[in-house]
Amino acid sequence: MTVGMVGIALVSLGMVLTPGPNMVYLISRSIAQGRRAGLISLAGVVLGFTVYLTATCLGLTAVFAYVPAAYTALKLAGAAYLLWLAWNAVKPGGTSAFQTRDLPVERPAKLFGMGLLTCLLNPKIAILYLSLLPQFIDPSMGHVLLQSLALGSVQIVVATTVNGLIAISAGALAAFLASRPAWLRVQRYIMGSLLGGFAVLMATDRSKALAPA
């Protein structure tokens, strides 16, 4: 189980550091409206993680365990999505999540709701729970449901910590990188390479989804 937790933590770290809807929104909101707005938005994102994790552990995983073709299709779709993100990161003219964007000032309730909606509409999160999470479960240890919850909790902790740090430091990072375009390119290439690697691993994986027990 410890090995699985380390594995999911590393994968989660790679994915949370990859520019995606959650990161782009949190960075943009923090730069436009301040750290407090970014952290309120992050609270909504965390609730979205929890909703996905709960739904997966209570039934969605079982569906894929009993319909292997659907699970395979999801993994291939996930791999294609990750490759698309990788291409967008490294293609000529690609943009970094740390390039500033203008956003209107919003109230706390709306910030929270927008963070939640951004997370729920982010297919990367569904892919993480439905296709990556089962690969770190050890059937010999039993209690697949508990293992799923524990591993998913690790992902939430990693994502919350990293996104929290990003929200707090977004303004300073944006100013730092704005004057160093070469650093922006390096950041894009590193994230694109990580995404491409995850896509290949996902597409070539032959493991099966496990039904909760």
Image: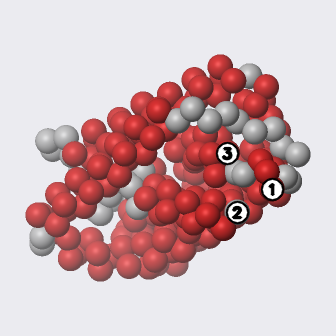
Tell whether label 1 touches label 2 (CB within 8 Å). yes
Label 3: element kind: helix
Residue at 76%, 31% (x, y): give it. 65
Q: Nearer the viewer, mark 1 or mark 3?
A: 1
- Location of mark 3 (residue): 134
Between marks 2 and 3 in the image, the one whose residue lies nearer the viewer: 2
Whether label 1 touches label 3, CB < 8 Å: no
Q: Do the residues labelled 2 and 3 touch (CB within 8 Å)?
A: no
Q: What residue type is labelled 1?
A: Met
Is 132 positioned to the left or the right of 57 in the image? left
Query: Up-down: is 96 above or below 42?
Result: above
- Tell whether 192 sits left or right of 133: left
Q: Where is residue 5 in the image (x, y as percent from the top left)?
A: 63, 64
60, 109: nearer the viewer: 60
Q: Is residue 177 left or right of residue 153?
A: left
**Residue 1: image tag:** 2
- For the N terminus, the image quarter is bottom right
- The C terminus: image quadrant: top right
Nearer-N-terminus badge (2/1): 2
In terms of depth relative to the viewer, which is nearer, 206 or 189? 206
Q: What residue type is labelled 3?
A: Pro
Q: Looking at numbered disc 2 in the image, what kind of residue is underneath it?
A: Met
Q: How far apart are marks 2 and 1 (CA)?
A: 8 Å
Q: Which residue is drawn at 50% across and 28% down?
A: 76
Local secondary structure at mark 1: helix
Is residue 33 visible in this depiction of the protein?
Answer: no
Q: Which mark is residue 196?
A: none
- State the residue position of label 1: 141
